Image: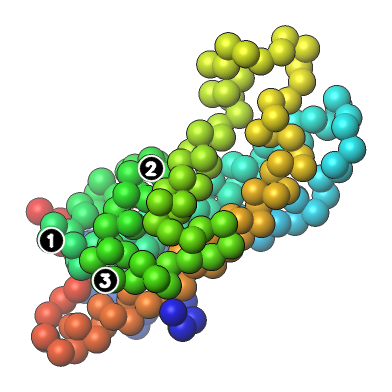
């Protein structure tokens, strides 16, 4: 899958007015893209500062990295679904897309879109060799919410020690996979935008989802 200019590129004014009220981002596509990119950049910078030596005082320092990656992934998933849901039999309601924070639901929609356009062979990156592995990785990120794990875990130690999934060396390894995942999500959204533009040109239609 060739890399194209970002799908969340600044649109011309008339195009923005035409689709703003029918998109989950309400025309704020470039702003959201820049924010998602900033979240990713902040996560990568923070990863570089993590100490891999055991230290009770810094044991939880890797947790903010996961939260930054999680929000960036959420926005990239929403972007991809927003660009590709019209390739599905029933386009995703943009209001539901805007309001949701469920990575699992978004990943299901992404998988459906990738299958619909038959891009399973190109939707791959380090740590993601299939849609099943993509779903598993997203589900893993969904479950890595530090407060929920601390509140609901019945096997945690009561000494303040960090669970294994939040240890810095574990998060550093996971971050490499998430960097690659964000790249493939961005590239796929770009390609979907190009495919949608091409379909509009051929059919004279409007590929933007509508609110019922």
Q: Position of residue 53 (x, y in %)?
A: 89, 38
Residue designated by label 1: 89
Residue designated by label 3: 117
Residue designated by label 2: 104
Mark nearer the N terminus (2 vs 1): 1
Q: Of circles 3 and 1, which is in front?
A: 3
Asked if the residue at tag 1 contacts the one at tag 2, i.e. Cβ–Cβ closer than 8 Å, the answer is no
Q: In the visual, does 207 lie left or right of 35? A: left
Using the image, determine if residue 86 lies above or below residue 78: below
- Colouring mode (rainbow / by chain / secondary structure / one colour): rainbow
What residue do we see at 10% from left, 53% from top? Answer: 212
Instruction: Categorize mark 1 by other alpha carbons within 10 Å: few (<14), some (14-19), many (20+).
Output: few
What residue do we see at 12% from left, 61% from top? Answer: 89
Q: Nearer the viewer, residue 208 or 70?
A: 70
**Cα–Cα span, label 2 and label 1:** 20 Å
Q: Secondary structure at mark 1?
A: loop
- In this rendering, the count of numbered labels is 3
């Amino acid at each position: 899958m060739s890399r194209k200019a970002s799908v969340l590129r600044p649109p011309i004014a008339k195009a923005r007015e035409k689709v703003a009220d029918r998109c989950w981002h309400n025309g704020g596509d470039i702003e959201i893209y820049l924010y998602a990119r900033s979240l990713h950049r902040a996560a990568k910078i923070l990863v570089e500062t993590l100490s891999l030596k055991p230290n009770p005082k810094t044991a939880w320092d890797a947790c903010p990295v996961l939260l930054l990656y999680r929000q960036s992934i959420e926005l990239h998933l929403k972007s991809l679904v927003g660009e590709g849901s019209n390739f599905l039999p029933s386009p995703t309601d943009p209001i539901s897309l805007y309001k949701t924070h469920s990575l699992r639901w978004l990943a299901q929609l992404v998988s459906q879109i990738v299958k619909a356009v038959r891009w399973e062979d190109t939707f791959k990156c380090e740590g993601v060799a299939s849609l099943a592995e993509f779903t598993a990785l997203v589900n893993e990120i969904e479950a890595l919410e530090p407060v929920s794990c601390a509140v609901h875990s019945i096997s945690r130690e009561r000494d303040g020690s960090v669970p294994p999934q939040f240890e810095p060396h574990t998060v550093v390894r996971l971050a490499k996979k998430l960097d690659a995942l964000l790249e493939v999500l961005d590239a796929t959204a770009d390609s979907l935008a190009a495919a949608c533009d091409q379909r509009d040109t051929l059919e004279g239609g409007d590929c933007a989802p509508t609110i019922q």
